[in-house]
Image: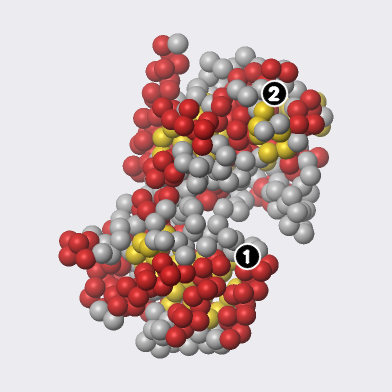
Amino acid sequence: MNILSVASEVFPLIKTGGLADVAGALPLALAGHGIRVRTLMPGYPIVMQRLAGPKVVATFDDLLGEPARILAATHEGLDLLVLDAPAFFDRPGGPYTDGSGNDFVDNWQRFAALSFAGAEVARGLLPDWRPDIVQAHDWQAAMTPVYMRYTGLQHIPTILTVHNLAFQGQFGADIFDKLRLPPQAFAVDGLEYYGDVGFLKGGLRTAWSITTVSPTYAQEIMTPEYGMGLEGLINARAADLEGIVNGIDTAVWNPESDTHIARPYAAGSLRQRAVNRQAVAERFNIEQDGGPIFCVISRLTWQKGIDIIADVTDWIVEQGGKLVVLGSGDQGLEGALLAAASRHRGRIGIVIGYNEPLSHLMQAGADAILIPSRFEPCGLTQLYGLRYGCIPVVARTGGLADTVIDANEAALSARVATGFQFTPINADGLRQALRRVFKAWQEPKVWGRIQNQGMKAEVSWESSAARYADLFSSLLTRANLS
């Protein structure tokens, strides 16, 4: 079975969030099911620099107004098709924003071009390969099933995977005439979205199947609270909606072989974590004493509940805890955390930015990871925490609720607890959970059991890849019957 995956970022080539981790790990997991995935992604400068021996397999004289090529290459086991379109992707900044953090004004054109190229690959653009199914990730690739629907490819099964419904790719109606779609595509059952053009909305309408990255999030997005204005459409497509929880690459995230940490360890040798704990304390200039070290590894945004963290920093220190933070985002939240670090030197440490090796060390050395997200489609940092014995303290929402077993009395008695959940999702709710965390910390045997149980949790792609394989098979059966 051949699958074309269309994604705007793919780890380890380029990453801004969990989408890249999924786009990079799922194809490798599906290979064990006899499924070949080729991933179409943009040729950002950092991607072009890292490709080894790329081969031109297709050209466009006019890809939404610009020349482009598709390059075939492999990278760390991934089978890649890279869209080399310099006018769209060869520029400084990130995948979506310039050096000042502002969205590129032509993002609609850049990612419509990526989707258009995906549809052409599905049509048979490559001389020796054609996909059986196309999977598009988030709004940046959501136009792929739209182009396929309106250009005679509706017989090929398509899946739209929603990693975060909050990012929808909504643009003014004036761009529609430049998308090279027939007039009927700008309608309620197509791209039209409150008078604008909605890339994600169009993908939700036209894809054969919709997946989200956890079962709970699949249910949540059918409600007004989490549906972000699209709950009506999602409810109408409920029969085609499935939540499949993300996994992680357990070869990359493996405390027994991780080269980014100070000392490798396993569940049976948790005392070795002390070396990593010391390395974390030294990196963030915090004191080492009897209190737990909490970590935050996150975009610093309201969605991630970072304002809740800021509200409880003083209280954490009063209780004897320490806090280390790695991330960037909202300047006001960055400032609040930096101010807390200034108030509590030696107890709170902050690194603004993102550093992949440091994130590994923090998971290996901190005692618990705080994830108070107001909504979280899946979340990966709690899975990394489980894998590394860094106990997750999570809001009861989305994939966080699906992947962490709360350390309530019943779960502790049954020895199945893997972390701590809390609700309501506010400062009081987090403080209540942290009171339970501090109590468990005072009982080393209880703490150790929670750590060990978390490290036994199934966090790989194995079971989730099997569910995707089943979904692909059912779509092919449906296509053959139609």
Residue in view at x 55 percent, y 79 percent:
349
Could you tell me if residue 151 is visible in this image? Answer: yes
Q: Is residue 16 left or right of residue 460?
A: right
10 Å crowding of disc 1: few (<14), some (14-19), many (20+): some
Could you tell me if residue 35 is visible in this image? Answer: no
Coloration mode: secondary structure
Per the image, the residue denoted by label 2 is: 186
* Mark 1 or mark 2, whichever is nearer to me: 2
Residue type at the position of mark 2: Phe
Residue 42 drawn at (x, y percent)? 67, 41
Q: Which element carries disc 2, helix, strand or loop?
A: loop
Please state, as top left, top right, bottom left or bottom right, where the C terminus lies in the image: top left
Spatial CA distance of label 1 from label 2 is 37 Å
Residue in view at x 81 percent, y 40 percent:
87
**Which residue occupies the foreground of this view, 129 or 234?**
234
Up-down: is 251 above or below 222? below
Q: Which element carries disc 1, helix, strand or loop?
A: loop
Up-down: is 438 above or below 84? below
10 Å crowding of disc 2: few (<14), some (14-19), many (20+): many
In this view, the residue farthest toward the top is 482
Up-down: is 461 above or below 5? below
Q: Which of the 4 image quarters holds residue 440?
A: bottom left
Residue type at the position of mark 1: Ser
The mark nearer the N terminus, 1 or 2, is: 2
Please state, as top left, top right, bottom left or bottom right, where the N terminus lies in the image: top left
Residue in view at x 75 percent, y 28 percent:
176
Residue 91 drawn at (x, y percent)? 78, 49
**Which residue occupies the foreground of this view, 88 or 239?**
239
- Label at residue 444: none
Per the image, the residue denoted by label 1 is: 328
Residue in view at x 34 percent, y 64 percent:
420
